[in-house]
Amino acid sequence: MRQRIEFWFQAVAGTIHDRPWFFIIVAVLVATGLGMQISRLRIDTSNESYFHHTDPVLTVYDDFKAQFGTDELIIVAIEAPDVFDPAFLHKLEKLHDELAENVPHLADITSLVNARNTRGETDRLIVEDLLENFPKNGDELAALKDRAMSNPLYINRLISPDATMTGIILETDLAETEAPDDVLAGFDDEPAGDEAVEKKPARTKNEMAETIVNKVEEITAKYDSDDFDIQLAGVPVVLKVQKEAMMKDMGRFMMLALLTIGLCLFLMFHRISGVFLPITVVMLSLFSTLGLMGLFNVPFTLPSMILPSFLLAVGVGAAVHILSLVFREMGHGEDKRTAIIHALGHSGIAVVITSFTTAVGLASFATTALAPIAALGIFGGSGVLLSLFYTIVLIPALLAIIPLKKKKEKPAATRTNDRFDHIMDWIAELVARRPKMITTITILLMIAGLGSALQLRFSHNVLEWQPPSWECRQATERIDKIMGGTINIEIIVDTGKENGLYDPAVLKDLDRLAQELKVFDDGKVKVANASSVADIIKEIHQALNENRPEFYKVPDNAALIPQEFLLFENSGSDDLEKVIDSSFRKARFTLQVPWLDVFYYNGLLKKIETSFQESIGNRATVTITGLLQLFVHTVKAATLSMAEGYIIAAVLITLMMVMLVGGLRMGLISMVPNLAPVIFVMGLMHWIALPLDTYTMMIGTIALGLAVDDTVHFLNSFRRYFSMGQPAKEAIRSTLRTSGRAMLITTVVLALGFFMFTFASMLNIERFGYLTGLTLVLALLADFFSVPALMILMYSKKQSEENV
């Protein structure tokens, strides 16, 4: 079977060499057809992009936003010695008004300037802005400060407890405005002539968020000063920062990857063709893969930024193994056609298997509940297979038409000063003398790594992906420290019936829960504020009872509640719409918390579930949602999906190794040196206190899929030399001298491709890069030492292929 496959590859190589232009045209047509779809590729760095459209958690969140508005707020925090200084208040009012008038896509804006101030006057309910009447003297200023500092809804939301920081809260309208492709476009009845209106393309959420934040930054820059220190935080700010970092890094990574690959190829082959051909293959693979994403309308997300550099580095491997054999055979005096046929016949099987193992490693992500990780798996794997297609088709075809000089290779006997061969011979000798010791060390490192890896903690903190020096992170952490929180947990309470919120018992439960959760502090998370519709009814009831403090409560008389709500609605305020639906069936309950690692919220979330169930479980259904809940679900989905992915990748790659070596026992044993580097690096992460997040979780399957490649090439060459009658030690020496050189250069290219991510702006990409690169370096060492040691132990007494 093996020989038949090799003969088939030789026949394919001959056919491609004899009809090169036909195959070049086919490859160009495929690349052009897919590449033209890149124009449809869009960028999406939103939090929702992490979920499939059918995900129930995302559906609940979308329903929440449709009903109550988005919780993606921009926080403009201003720090000053005294927030209630008249000059400060005038400046705050001016800034508030300019933001309200000029920031696009703004659903609402709230600050001390227009904070709700509910009061009663004779028999009237008055709902006005806090600074409706600007204080004219010290007494009025003192009264204003007293009103603000005594209102629990202002504290930590609009003003810090020590009155040194105040916030302007901008509620954005970031609903997606992209319309799907309209197959009937052009057939609408549209006005012509002067009545025709030019249509502008719909804007994506990311574009809208960027526009909003840019305008806010532009306006606030004019007001920023030492005594009016402005800091920006909030999800739209984080989205913009991430997108800017992604766009800057991607271009830099691609340039570095191309330069590194080109240099490594030139040092290996000393030929322009040895640089041009592999880079042509990887560039076509990259553009085809991006076009494939555009064709299927899959957005380019933050995890996708590793894809271009990854494909550039990975795609080189197959081309290097084929070209190294072609140039070697030509160096031995063979003509170009014979050299191409020999190279594809010798390495065709290994190239196909290594491409499939890499694709399988990536494709194991396809089942994950996180949409961008699943897309990375699907299209990363597709890119690897496209690279295989271009390698098999284009490399022989282009070699056939490109004039190549025959560089005569020195006879082995005269290459006494070849340093690489000396090193390979030393390794072969060491392995032959100490196979048991090398194998024992490998197993011990694997066991030590496994014991440490099992203690790894999981993490998901988008803010900590940013370096500590970034303004966005500093501002968020500063606001969290002074104001208590920059992100919300949203809870939907559904009474299940129209006017269910007129029930005093339900409102009193909401009020009691707010007071209980407002003081929650488990040492990790401290709640900054809690609010619900109960706060509004308490304000109304107090105002209608001569503003007396003892009436700041939910009325006991059920008949009063609809009347008081009606008076509030007639006052001109629309604040009720933000916390209840139009049928008075559903209510919004909001907790303000600091931006932390999502695993820190486990205690609070359990407390919420328990408290709501005990207090209101028999009168309403409770659903937790909001951005923070999306983050929590992200980690849960990633943890489960990655565990499944690791198992799928390990099983499928092991089966492929069994098929390659032709035996279950040998296939299983050959996986040990490939699993050892992955497990060791996972253990190393625990030793250096790095957590498993949605990026470092990918290291195992990606590295395993790549690490197996060198093992496949080693075993493929070893079997060939061993079947020719060479003893195991000599077969290892021959393998290391031939395939070892290509294994080294491909690993160097791959490792450097990942090490480039250490120049990333964001820490999560940086960690992913150097950990994956380190894993590949360790995998090469395993292929140079551990795999040969296993071959010595298993085949030192066998001299024929039939016994393998």
Image (spheres, rainbow, N blue to C red):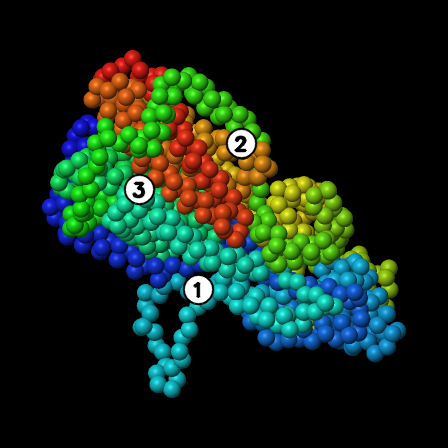
Quarter-of-image position of residue 570: bottom right
Q: Amino acid at mark 1?
A: Glu
Which mark identifies residue 683? 2
Q: Amino acid at mark 3?
A: Met
Furthest residue in direction top, as rendered: 797
Q: CA distance from mark 3 to mark 2?
A: 34 Å
Which mark identifies residue 271? none
Q: 43 and 324: which one is in front?
A: 324
Q: Residues within 10 Å of mark 2 (few under 14, many from 20)?
A: many
The reply to whether dot 3 and dot 2 touch (C-beta < 8 Å) is no
Which residue carries the number 3 mark?
Answer: 268
Circle 3 or circle 2, nearest the eye: 3
Task: Please provide percent x and percent y for residue 122.
Answer: 84, 74
Q: Secondary structure at mark 2?
A: helix
Q: 618 and 116: which one is in front?
A: 116
Q: Work out whether mark 3 precedes mark 2 in sequence or the reverse, and give the earlier one.
A: 3
Q: Amino acid at mark 2?
A: Gly
Q: Is residue 396 left or right of residue 298?
A: left
The reply to whether dot 3 and dot 1 touch (C-beta < 8 Å) is no
Which residue carries the number 1 mark?
Answer: 178
| Relative to 235, residue 357 above or below | above
Q: Secondary structure at mark 1?
A: loop
Q: Work out whether mark 2 precedes mark 1 in sequence or the reverse, and give the earlier one.
A: 1
Task: Please provide percent x and percent y for residue 57.
Answer: 53, 49
Q: Please say whether residue 594 is visible from this viewpoint.
A: yes
